[in-house]
């Protein structure tokens, strides 16, 4: 858990235990200039509970030369341009990060700080060189400058790690994770195990001139063998659409044939027969029929059909969930796991999550900077430099560092032409092994799914968001559905306060309408607080028929059980963020009497043989 402190210190202890394992100062100057009382409290806490401090030297307009950090035997020079960063291989902090190489080239920014010290408590963790373009040296070899230092605590009993620049430099992100682990004595440590899977969507799909030829397939096989030597268990996972088999030119059709001759070299999954988006189907029979065509194609060509994994084109129907897709997947393929980049949203990628729906595990899917049109390096947005930046410490590299389970989306076209996908993944894996101690492995999707939800049991339950809040979600949502039919206010109870009467009176208004009745719970849908939530958004929306523009009404829902439902606020806000909330608050005594009359009318034995006062007195004695 992370807490952001304000001007005053938060409560540091809970009974006899410390609440924080590490204290982080984004601007270390704030720590140095804390008022005496708070500084003494914080330092005392750090000593007594063996808590470390991470501090960043913040950029400022004033350039400091040999300035002493207040109260410490260490000095800084600021606003420097640096290059060629390297690490101290003997540092005890290094865990995820691996030393031994140099990050060549100019470091980002012109506001670096470097450290000089004259006390044994300090040990450099990272060095860099002055940028010779800015600071000519006349050929004289310059000593390395300490850009990150460890304070062993010999000076004042508190261990620290001080950074001379922000996390903008990719290597500092790794060192920050290691600093948290070291200073918290392992309590804030990430596992070093990473599992990855590379999906290749659109196999057999693509215009002439963009498809795989025999030499591309051969390169795919050869590269896969090299990657398997670096990542145990690695196999490319091929998603096929059988309708477009042999739709290329002569050489590309030979490439299709070569893929099938080597079918056992890869893992396979269904990607829809005709590459049609499932949300466009409003008939289960038609959807099942098209899936069966792909399954029959697979059996005819010797492609395995038992992976238990599938991904729909453009992730359509996975989220927002199209119930027909989940039903058809189970019926035809017995799907147990899928993946999407859309839950809860595409961006920011760090917030992608998984969930389970209809016994199908939905895993977060990652992008790698390659898309259907990304075939040539000279046409890559930003050029090769941009792609290499992502590989060498950038977005792709960090995606694998931060996520224990990684399923990457690529497309068949990325493996032809300039074969950018082969270059990208081989390069990033080698870069990871050069700079980290991560243990990379691969496994089939079903194993990845089981591992993912063991690591993230809190993500099992879905949270249905409003599809109309995300333009990407609207594009992969059925045209027969409309957010306009969702309720605009909720009557949430509590029970026995007259909510049913209010529901009746509101429904009499010509411009207001409620949901259709639930066969099991009458006028209450009871969606947000119980098992009905797992039936999905389609089930809920069936109680609110789409209305014509001329007869649009102000829709509402009444479920008195929402008042004290633990999950109701989160779920209701996700789906209906702008809905108004109505509750009726009356005397608890009146609620109790109403409940007494209710159970008495239903033939309750105790209520029929005792007065309200006798029952309430018994309940009071029982509670006390």
Image (tube, helix red, strand yellow):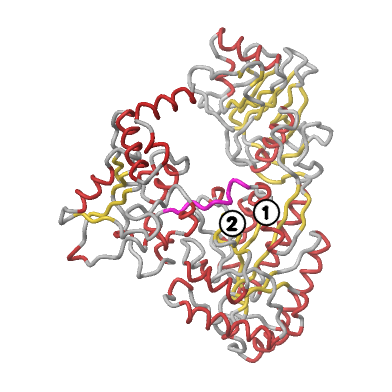
Residue visible at 76% across and 85% down? 261
Residues at discs 2 and 1 in contact (Cβ within 8 Å): yes
* Main secondary structure along the magenta-highlighted residues: loop
Q: Earlier in the sequence, mark 2 or mark 1?
A: 2
**Hey, which quadrant is residue 74 in on the image?**
top right
The residue singled out by tag 1 in the image is 405
| Whole-percent x, y for residue 160 in the image | 70, 23
Residue at disc 1, secondary structure: strand
Left or right? Give the position of 351 relative to 106. Answer: left
Residue sitting farthest toward the front: 609
- 94 is within the stretch colored magenta: no
- Of residues 355 and 509, the one nearer the viewer is 509
The residue singled out by tag 2 in the image is 364
Label 1 crowd (10 A; few <14 / some 14-19 / many >=20): many
- Of residues 577 and 365, the one nearer the viewer is 577
Left or right? Give the position of 57 relative to 184. Answer: left
Residue sitting farthest toward the bottom: 250
């Amino acid at each position: 858990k992370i807490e952001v402190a304000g001007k005053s210190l938060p409560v540091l202890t809970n009974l006899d235990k410390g609440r924080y394992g590490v204290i982080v100062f984004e601007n270390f100057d704030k720590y140095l200039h804390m008022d005496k009382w708070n500084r003494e409290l914080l330092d005392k806490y750090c000593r007594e509970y063996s808590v470390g401090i991470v501090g960043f030297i913040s950029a400022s307009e004033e350039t400091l030369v040999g300035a002493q950090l207040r109260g410490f035997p260490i000095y800084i020079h600021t606003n420097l341009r640096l290059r060629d960063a390297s690490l101290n291989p003997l540092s005890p902090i290094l865990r995820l990060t691996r030393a031994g190489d140099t990050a060549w080239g100019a470091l980002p920014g012109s506001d670096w700080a470097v450290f000089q010290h004259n006390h044994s408590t300090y040990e450099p963790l990272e060095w860099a060189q002055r940028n010779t373009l800015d600071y000519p040296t006349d050929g004289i070899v310059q000593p390395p400058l300490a850009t990150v230092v460890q304070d062993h605590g010999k000076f004042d009993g508190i261990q620290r790690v001080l950074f001379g620049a922000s996390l903008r430099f990719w290597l500092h992100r790794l060192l920050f994770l290691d600093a948290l682990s070291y200073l918290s004595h392992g309590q804030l440590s990430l596992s070093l195990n990473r599992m990855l899977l590379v999906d290749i969507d659109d196999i057999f799909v693509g215009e002439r001139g963009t498809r795989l030829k025999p030499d591309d397939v051969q390169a795919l096989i050869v590269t896969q063998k090299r990657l398997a030597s670096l990542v145990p268990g690695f196999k490319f996972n091929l998603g096929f659409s059988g309708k477009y088999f042999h739709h290329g030119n002569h050489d590309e059709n030979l490439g299709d044939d070569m893929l099938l001759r080597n079918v056992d070299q890869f893992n396979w999954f269904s990607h829809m027969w005709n590459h049609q988006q499932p949300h466009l189907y409003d008939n289960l029979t038609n959807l099942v029929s098209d899936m069966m065509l792909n399954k029959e194609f697979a059996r005819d060509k010797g492609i395995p059909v038992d992976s238990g994994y599938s991904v729909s084109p453009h992730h359509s129907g996975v989220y927002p969930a199209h119930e027909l897709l989940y039903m058809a997947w189970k019926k035809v393929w017995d799907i147990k796991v899928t993946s999407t980049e859309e839950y809860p949203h595409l961006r920011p990628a760090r917030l992608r999550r998984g969930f389970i729906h209809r016994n199908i595990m939905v895993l977060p899917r990652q992008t790698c900077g390659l898309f259907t049109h990304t075939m040539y390096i000279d046409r890559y947005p930003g050029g090769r430099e941009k792609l290499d930046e992502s590989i060498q410490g950038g977005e792709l590299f960090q995606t694998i560092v931060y996520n224990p389970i990684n399923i990457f989306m690529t497309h068949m076209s990325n493996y032809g032409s300039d074969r950018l996908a082969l270059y990208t993944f081989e390069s990033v894996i080698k870069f990871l092994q050069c700079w980290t101690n991560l243990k990379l492995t691969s496994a089939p999707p079903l194993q990845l799914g089981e591992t993912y939800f063991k690591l993230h049991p809190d993500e099992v339950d879905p949270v249905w968001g409003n599809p109309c809040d995300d333009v990407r979600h609207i594009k992969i949502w059925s045209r027969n559905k409309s957010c306009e039919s969702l309720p605009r206010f909720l009557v949430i109870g509590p029970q026995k306060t007259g909510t049913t009467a209010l529901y009746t009176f509101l429904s009499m208004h010509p411009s207001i309408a409620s949901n259709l009745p639930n066969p099991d719970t009458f006028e209450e849908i009871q969606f947000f607080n119980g098992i009905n939530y797992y039936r999905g958004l389609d089930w809920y929306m069936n109680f609110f028929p789409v209305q014509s523009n001329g007869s649009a009404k102000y829709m509402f829902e009444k479920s008195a059980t929402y008042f004290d439902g633990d999950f109701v606020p989160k779920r209701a806000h996700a789906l209906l963020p702008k809905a108004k909330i109505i509750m009726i608050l009356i005397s608890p005594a009146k609620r109790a009497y109403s409940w007494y009359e209710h159970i008495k009318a239903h033939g309750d034995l105790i209520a029929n043989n005792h007065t309200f006062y006798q029952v309430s007195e018994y309940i009071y004695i029982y509670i006390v």
